[in-house]
């Protein structure tokens, strides 16, 4: 007899920069979320879907837990904490190189204890740990805090143990239907994908202060056939930044920085969309948008 089909929602929670978005991308096998070696990369909840023979798992990547400094940050924290409660399984991601439970992780643990959901502890970045005993000590520390459904040490960049996460989740899901079409791997619109990709490149090439003050808006996205009958997307997007000096940095000498961001973003988008992309990016200043309710609303739970 066939096994019954299972499905469920699984959130990925953790401090900023522990590798949550790298994990969702590795699990889904496609880039759904921006990854950067900077804090507060993810700003909204992003869904990624994994279809297996007998199950469908819907992952929700969330903004990292950090100390809030603006209305945008407060909104990000609300989003993250909300997904500790209302899901079937929580993946709590911690950094393998940590040696104690810091403030951010304690706060998350508190919420996990309140929510009493099935929670899997994921210890990421094990490629950075030299001594196995250190890892065992860390596991012990956390296991004293909560009765985790499982503890899985992984390396998301090396894709080590990623399949074990899927198997462990599947074991803990209940019978249920496929909520998403099996061709879909994310619920982000293609406009949101454009924004996420451009922001990822900006985070990659720009220094700390500038990219945190950016948001991207896709102004136009149109598919057409060229004279040679090839498909192409015409995409226009605007990068909003906080100050005129930032605008200068983003554009760069003779436009070189903007060109670099655009070229890398275009290549990613062409891979993701499977067609050619003609990408134009503008840069505009919008002061203090981080505390502007109308703009921050865009990042609220949907
Ligand atoms: N060495 C190592 N680095 C990793 C691993 N997983 C992720 N990283 C790196 O850690 C950094 C942060 O990764 P992200 O996936 O953006 O982290 P995040 O938790 O989503 O961060 P926020 O969105 O800011 O909360 C990036 O530079 C990743 O390449 C891993 O297994 N090993
Ligand atoms: Mg992230």
Image (spheres, rainbow, N blue to C red):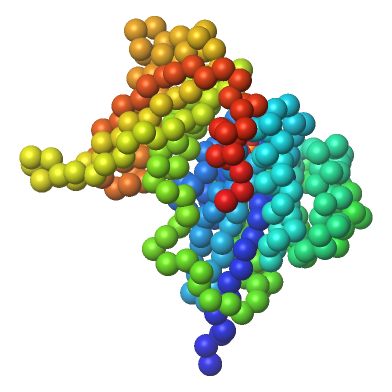
Left or right, 148 with respect to 122, comes to: right
Q: Residue at x 68, y 39 (%)?
A: 75
In depth, the one of 102 and 245 nearer the eye is 245
Q: Position of residue 93 (x, y in %)?
A: 71, 48
In depth, the one of 11 and 85 nearer the eye is 85
Q: Residue at x 22, y 41 (%)?
A: 232
Q: Position of residue 299 (x, y in %)?
A: 58, 40
Residue 49, placed above or below residue 252: below
Left or right, 100 with respect to 196, comes to: right
Q: In which image quadrant can residue 212 be found?
A: top right
In depth, the one of 54 and 79 nearer the eye is 79
| Outermost residue to the front | 294
Q: Position of residue 51 (x, y in %)?
A: 49, 67
Q: Residue at x 39, y 19 (%)?
A: 258
Residue 285, placed above or below residue 56: above
Q: In which image quadrant can residue 40 be found?
A: top right
Is residue 261 at all visible to an observer of this figure?
A: yes
Residue 189, placed above or below residue 3: above
Is residue 153 at all visible to an observer of this figure?
A: no
Residue 203, placed above or below residue 158: above
Q: Position of residue 42 (x, y in %)?
A: 59, 38
Q: Residue at x 33, y 31 (%)?
A: 236
């Amino acid at each position: 007899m066939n096994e019954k089909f299972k499905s469920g929602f699984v959130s990925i929670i953790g401090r900023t920069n522990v590798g949550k978005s790298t994990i969702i991308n590795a699990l889904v096998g496609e880039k759904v979320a921006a990854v950067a070696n900077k804090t507060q990369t993810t700003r909204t909840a992003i869904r990624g879907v994994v279809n297996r023979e007998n199950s469908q798992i819907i992952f929700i990547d969330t903004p990292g837990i950090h100390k809030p400094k603006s209305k945008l940050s407060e909104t990000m924290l609300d989003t993250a904490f909300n997904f500790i409660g209302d899901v079937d399984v929580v993946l709590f991601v911690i950094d393998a190189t940590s040696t104690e439970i810091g403030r951010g992780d304690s706060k998350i643990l508190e919420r996990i204890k309140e929510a009493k959901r099935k929670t899997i502890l994921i210890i990421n970045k094990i490629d950075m740990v030299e001594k196995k005993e250190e890892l065992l000590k860390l596991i012990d520390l956390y296991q004293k805090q909560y009765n985790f459904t499982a503890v899985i040490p992984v390396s998301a960049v090396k894709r080590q143990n990623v399949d074990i996460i899927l198997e462990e989740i599947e074991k803990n899901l209940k019978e249920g239907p496929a909520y998403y079409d099996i061709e879909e791997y994310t619920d982000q619109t293609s406009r949101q994908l454009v924004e996420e990709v451009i922001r990822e490149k900006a985070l990659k090439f720009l220094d700390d202060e500038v990219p945190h003050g950016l948001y991207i808006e896709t102004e136009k996205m149109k598919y057409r056939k060229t004279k040679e009958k090839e498909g192409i997307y015409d995409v226009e997007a605007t990068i909003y930044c906080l100050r005129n000096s930032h605008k200068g940095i983003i554009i760069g000498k003779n436009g070189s920085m903007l060109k670099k961001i655009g070229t890398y973003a275009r290549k990613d988008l062409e891979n993701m969309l499977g067609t050619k992309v003609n990408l134009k990016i503008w840069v505009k200043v919008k002061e203090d948008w981080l505390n502007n309710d109308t703009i921050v609303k865009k990042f609220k739970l949907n």
